[in-house]
Image (tube, rainbow, N blue to C red):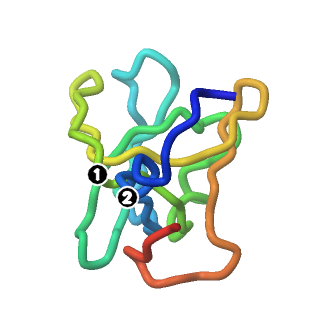
Amino acid sequence: MKDLITFEDFTKVDLRVGTIIEVHDFPEARNPAYQLYIDFGSLGVKKTSAQITTLYKKDDLIDKQVVAVVNFPKKQIANFMSECLLIGAVNAKDVVLLNPETKVKNGTAVS
């Protein structure tokens, strides 16, 4: 387990649900990855990269709802600027994306 945090620490993390609307290969990444464009409703479309190529095909990701942290600072990854961080469970080396069981409005907060 990691260090304990306070509830106030947790409330600083802005987790939102969004829908993947575009997926592109990302050959410039060090490890196999995709570039994802995610619609977060009123927050707009944010992009990120994700090393999820072993479990997910590009076509399977389109219209998939995912959970992401949307209030991290932007991060340069190779020639791509990441604007959010997908949330997933690491199973061995593979990342399994976390998503709502039922479709919800894009931008819905996770608490």
Front-lying residue, 74 or 48: 74
Where's residue 92, x and y in %? 78, 26
Q: Residue at x 65, y 38 (%)?
A: 95
Residue to which mark 1 is pinned:
71
Q: Are marks 2 and 1 in contact (CB under 8 Å)?
A: yes
Front-lying residue, 78 or 25: 78
Sequence order check, earlier mark of 2 and 1: 2
Q: Quadrant of residue 45?
A: bottom left
Where's residue 36, x and y in %? 39, 50
Q: How many marks?
A: 2
- Vertical arrangement, residue 20 with respect to residue 49, above or below: below
Q: Residue at x 51, y 70 (%)?
A: 63
Secondary-structure class at tag 2: loop
Secondary-structure class at tag 1: loop
Amino acid under disc 1 = Asn
Mark 1 is surrounded, within 10 Å at the Cα level, by few (under 14), some (14 to 19) or many (20 or more) other residues, namely some
Front-lying residue, 88 or 6: 6
Q: Residue at x 27, y 22 (%)?
A: 78
Q: Quadrant of residue 48?
A: top left
Residue to which mark 2 is pinned:
14
Mark 2 is surrounded, within 10 Å at the Cα level, by few (under 14), some (14 to 19) or many (20 or more) other residues, namely some
Amino acid under disc 2 = Asp
